[in-house]
Amino acid sequence: TGMTTLDPGFGNTASCSSEITYIDGAAGILRYRGYPIEDLAVGATFLEVAYLVIYGELPEPAQLKEFSDKLRENAGIPDDMGALIDAMPRNGHPMSLMASAVNTLAAYYDDSVDPSDEEQVELATIRLMAKLPTIASRIYRNSIGEKPINPDESLDYVENFIKMTFGDGAPEGELGDLFNKAVGMLLVLHADHELNCSTATVRVVGSSQADIYASVASGINALSGPSHGGANQAVLEMLEEIRDSGISIDDFLERVKAREMRLMGFGHRVYKNFDPRSKEIKVLASQILDRDENPDELFKLALKLEAAALADSYFTDRKLYPNVDFYTGVIYRTMGFPTNMFTVLFAIGRLPGWVAHYREQLHDPAFRIARPRQHYVGASERRYPGASDA
Ligand code: CMC
């Protein structure tokens, strides 16, 4: 062990080579397969970006249609699986229920669990992408005591998810179009982020030759924590707490600086400058939340909190800036998603990244089982009472 370097949280260890996502954390640059995130966020649909991330190139129109058709055809889940989801605790956290449901896909579709068979991996890719929104919306419908809504093959990916979630309550007309566009853009901004905790988890689990469903279910679990994807829920809860307790923003930041709590939605392991995703999301938030002369109160609070933190040397000295999770919650809330569904939306967005990394790893000539080393700091040899002295 004298040969190994201690690197808590793998902050300095590159564990693979990858062609998927480029990040320059000092400059605030993010690109999927070479394409800047700003261009994709404005110009591309989520399915185009999912295709790009997974297969490496933007799809030709015919390829996109084929991909989209396959997802529409595979969006349903078996009745047995629906019944299984319906039997899960209705007030359980949707991330926990979703990870469990995704884990069972390997059992319902055991013809697509062999990582050494490319056709099986491709089939599982389509099934995961197609079924995750169906699973997520069913969990939501159960949580509010409403009947599930089956996927509608005539709708596109994002529209279908919104319809399965809200049914007749889905916004229509101009507002409906705005919401579809906004959800699509948020999914694009979440599609991949190289070796974040959940994607690293998918790779680690996949490195043992576990199937892709097991690996993605593990990724969902890793995403659920408040230091990672669960931060979008934690940000909204923080804003509500500030509003409800009446604490001033300055006093709240003093508590953060005294290390009683973290400022959720701030800070990042890699970005030491603005998170480029948060810039796009802030623009989107003002489009959605400033529609009338009565802007959303939590959005206003978030703007003030951000400004106060950025004017404080505690945060600027540590290069703590708003990350992707800072403004997403206020947008999702306005759309009618309950707080505990926010991280589920993150998972639907991140799925292409998880799948792409799992697949890339299978073809990596340097592929081998993930097995970090440790520095042992425990007791030296001891005698069990009564053991012989041999
Ligand atoms: N509020 C207050 N102080 C912070 C924060 C924060 N959000 N984040 C980091 N710090 C301080 C930390 O106390 C430390 O200060 P010091 O050097 O004086 O001890 C310094 O900044 C460096 O922090 P770190 O813990 O070494 O940073 P890390 O790279 O290990 O952690 C992080 C990254 C994202 C887990 C962390 O910034 C954090 O907990 N943020 C809040 C949760 C959050 O918003 N997570 C979402 C991340 S982005 C997208 C995603 O993954 O979902």
Image (cartoon, rainbow, N blue to C red):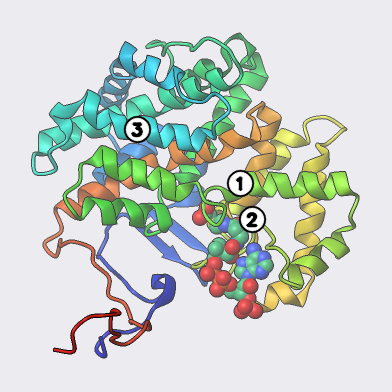
The percent coordinates of residue 358 (x first, y second) are: 25, 48
Sequence order check, earlier mark of 3 and 2: 3
Question: Which of marks 1 and 2 precedes in the sequence?
Answer: 1
Residue 134 in view here: yes
Describe the element under mark 1 as helix, strand or loop.
Answer: helix
Three-letter residue code for mark 1: Asn
Q: Name the residue under label 1.
A: 232
Mark 2–mark 1 CB contact (< 8 Å): yes
For label 3, the residue is: 102
* Secondary element type, mark 3: helix
On the picture, is 139 further left or further right than 263? left
Q: Name the residue under label 2.
A: 265
Q: Which residue is drawn at 66% across and 47% down?
A: 327
The residue closer to the viewer here, 78 or 301, is 78
Looking at the rendering, which quadrant does residue 339 occupy? top right
Is 80 rendered above or below residue 15? above
Q: Does the residue labelled 1 lie within 8 Å of ligand 1?
A: yes
Locate ligand 1 by image quadrant: bottom right
Name the one closer to the observer, 385 or 299.
385
Q: From the top left corner, tell me how far across and down residue 262 is, in percent.
A: 68, 63
Residue at image point 60% right, 53% down:
278
Left or right of 93 in this view: 62: left
Is residue 193 visible to us here?
no
Q: How far apart are marks 3 and 2 (CA)?
A: 27 Å
